[in-house]
Image (spheres, rainbow, N blue to C red):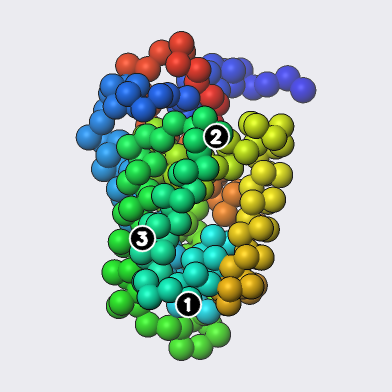
């Protein structure tokens, strides 16, 4: 099917996610803008988690596990998230994944924000509010994920695990993500984590939402050339 005139040029000019090593991420330019976007995205991510939890219709897949663990240890959910993030980073070693500044920030900041918001956000008082919390949580999470990935400062611990498993096991990203999250949800549910319709809605919707928002948040990196191995968004 013929493309509209100029479509090829527009596609070529579109911002891209680049495959940068940690040092190149910091040297690639526009760092103040990227840091601001990174922490805005991580903060929104930290808001989306309490919205899902207080909606009581099912947590995000990884949070099913976090809640299950938090029920059995004297730690807050946010602290469990942080500790789990660093355990996941240990799995990066055999996968030969390289963390960036955004990876470490993701591991720590989301848990801090989540604990803060959970102190103040009330439980949804009715079904209408429950649905509203869940929908808001899913949409905000999609925007937040696009923002921190688009900052080009490294993926989160769980994102990197998925891409690493995908590469090593010769699986598609979707298959790797589904396999890991099924195991995580099953383990969390056995520990008493909250699984429900919200969990399923999140699993189905967050990928398309992130893909939709990502082009709007990818920061162009003027100092990063094609030699670093750029990847289309």
Q: Which residue is mark 1?
A: 71
Could you say which is closer to the camera, residue 141 or residue 3?
141
Q: Which residue is mark 2?
A: 94
Q: Are marks 3 and 1 in contact (CB under 8 Å)?
A: no
Q: Are marks 2 and 3 in contact (CB under 8 Å)?
A: no
Name the front one of labels 3 and 1: 1
Expressed as whole percent of the image width and height from the top left, the position of residue 53 reads 47, 73
Q: CA distance from mark 1 to mark 2?
A: 30 Å
Q: Which residue is mark 3?
A: 111
Q: Residue furthest bottom?
A: 125
User: Can residue 178 be seen?
Assistant: yes
Q: Residue furthest right?
A: 1
Expressed as whole percent of the image width and height from the top left, the position of residue 173 reads 65, 39
Badge 3 element: helix
Rendered position, 171 above or below 197: above
Rendered position, 130 above or below 102: below
Could you say which is closer to the camera, residue 1 or residue 25?
25
Badge 1 element: loop
User: Can residue 59 be seen?
Assistant: no
Rendered position, 41 above or below 76: above
On screen, residue 147 versus residue 116, left or right, reads right
Q: Residue at x 31, y 62 (%)?
A: 113
Q: Looking at the figure, which quarter contains the N terminus?
A: top right
Which numbered dot is residue 22?
A: none
Occupied quadrant, residue 206? bottom right
Q: Residue at x 71, y 32 (%)?
A: 170
Q: Residue furthest top?
A: 227
């Amino acid at each position: 099917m013929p493309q509209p005139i100029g479509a090829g040029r527009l596609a070529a000019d579109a911002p891209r996610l680049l495959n940068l090593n940690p040092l190149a991420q910091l040297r690639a330019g526009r760092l103040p803008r990227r840091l601001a976007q990174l922490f805005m995205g991580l903060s929104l991510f930290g808001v989306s988690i309490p919205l899902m939890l207080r909606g009581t219709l099912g947590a995000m897949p990884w949070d099913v596990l976090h809640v299950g663990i938090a029920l059995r240890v004297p730690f807050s959910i946010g602290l469990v998230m942080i500790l789990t993030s660093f355990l996941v980073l240990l799995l990066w070693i055999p996968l030969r994944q390289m963390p960036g500044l955004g990876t470490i920030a993701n591991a720590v900041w989301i848990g801090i924000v989540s604990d803060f918001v959970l102190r103040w956000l009330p439980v949804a008082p009715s079904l209408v509010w429950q649905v509203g919390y869940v929908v808001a949580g899913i949409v905000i999470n999609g925007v937040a994920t696009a923002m921190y990935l688009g900052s080009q400062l490294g993926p989160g611990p769980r994102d990197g695990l998925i891409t690493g498993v995908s590469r090593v096991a010769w699986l598609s990203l979707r298959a790797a993500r589904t396999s890991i999250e099924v195991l995580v949800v099953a383990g969390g549910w056995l520990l008493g984590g909250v699984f429900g319709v919200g969990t399923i809605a999140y699993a189905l919707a967050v990928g398309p939402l992130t893909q939709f928002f990502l082009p709007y948040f990818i920061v162009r990196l003027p100092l990063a050339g094609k030699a670093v191995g750029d990847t289309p968004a």
